[in-house]
Image (cartoon, rainbow, N blue to C red):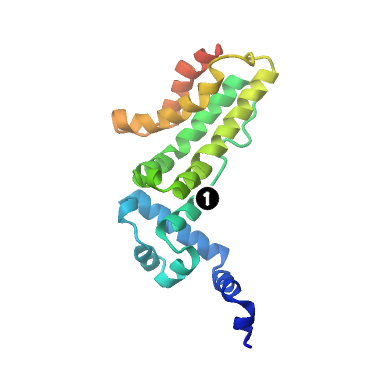
């Protein structure tokens, strides 16, 4: 019996997948996300990504099987907690810094969300990966900021506006391009926090 037969198909498949280095995998992920931003999800193909990264399309199909699986993996690998490390000792200032941080990356993330279009609503794996990459980490970081503010006595624990802060912060990121054709940049978001989020919490 050959070693391949002894190992079985699952082991052989895993061995083939392991030939892709982390650096090469990162190149594939960057390429597919950039093509989505540029061309839209529907226009992106495994063949197109293979051509742009100078690999065979069979390499991509062996690793991820389908385009939704490939894009979901790229989204998860792109997960970053951009609000991490913000802790000034003041809830108002934490929220201002979070707004500026969100403004710095809003163009890329908002364009990615827009480019995915309705695809994420039709594929639960894709939708979950999108939440894990772009939504859950930032909501968790915001909730930690709010909890610290409550612990310091800056806002009471039962304040009704607390649960709506993530919706306010993320909602404006999505809505401004629709209303004005412009992304919510750092200055705009900082003004938004001062004009709406802080007053809602009774802060200045």
Q: Quadrant of residue 97?
A: top right
How crowded is the residue under tag 1: few (<14 C-alpha within 10 Å), some, or many (20+)?
some
**In the figure, 105 relative to 154: above or below?**
below
State how many labels appear.
1
**In the figure, 52 relative to 181: above or below?**
below
**In the figure, 22 relative to 133: above or below?**
below
Is 196 in front, or is 186?
196
Residue that extends furthest to the top in the rendered view of this protein = 202
Picture quarter with the C terminus: top right
Q: Residue at x 31, y 32 (%)?
A: 178
Q: Quadrant of residue 20?
A: bottom right
Q: Residue 100 appears at what percent x and percent y? A: 50, 31
Is 24 in front, or is 77?
77
Tell me if residue 89 can be seen.
Answer: no
Picture quarter with the N terminus: bottom right
Q: Residue 128 appears at what percent x and percent y? A: 49, 45
Q: Residue 5 appears at what percent x and percent y? A: 60, 82
Q: Residue at x 48, y 50 (%)?
A: 75
- Residue 194 is left or right of residue 4, and the answer is left
- Residue 45 is left or right of residue 65, and the answer is left
Indicate the secondary structure of the residue bearing disc 1.
helix
Q: Where does label 1 land, which residue?
A: 76
Q: Residue at x 60, y 33 (%)?
A: 141
Q: Residue 55 appears at what percent x and percent y? A: 42, 71
Tell me if residue 47 can be seen.
Answer: yes
- Residue 114 is left or right of residue 83, and the answer is left
**In the figure, 187 relative to 150: above or below?**
below
Residue that extends furthest to the bottom in the rendered view of this protein = 1
Q: Residue at x 36, y 49 (%)?
A: 37
Q: Quadrant of residue 9?
A: bottom right
């Amino acid at each position: 019996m050959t070693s391949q037969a002894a190992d079985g198909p699952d082991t052989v498949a895993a061995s083939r997948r392991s030939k892709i280095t982390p650096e090469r995998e990162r190149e594939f992920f960057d390429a597919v996300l950039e093509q989505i931003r540029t061309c839209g999800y529907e226009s992106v193909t495994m063949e197109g990504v293979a051509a742009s990264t100078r690999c065979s399309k069979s390499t991509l199909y062996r690793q991820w099987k389908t385009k939704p699986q490939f894009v979901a993996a790229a989204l998860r690998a792109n997960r970053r907690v951009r609000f991490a490390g913000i802790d000034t000792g003041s809830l108002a200032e934490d929220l201002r810094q979070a707004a500026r941080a969100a403004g710095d990356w809003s163009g890329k993330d908002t364009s990615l969300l827009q480019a995915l279009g309705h695809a994420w609503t039709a594929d639960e794996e894709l939708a979950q990966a999108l939440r894990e990459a772009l939504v859950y980490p930032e909501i968790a970081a915001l909730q930690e900021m709010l909890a610290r503010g409550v612990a310091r006595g800056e806002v009471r624990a039962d304040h009704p506006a607390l649960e709506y802060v993530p919706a306010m912060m993320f909602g404006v990121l999505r809505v401004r391009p629709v209303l004005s054709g412009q992304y919510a940049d750092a200055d705009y978001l900082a003004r938004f926090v001062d004009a709406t989020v802080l007053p809602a919490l009774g802060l200045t």
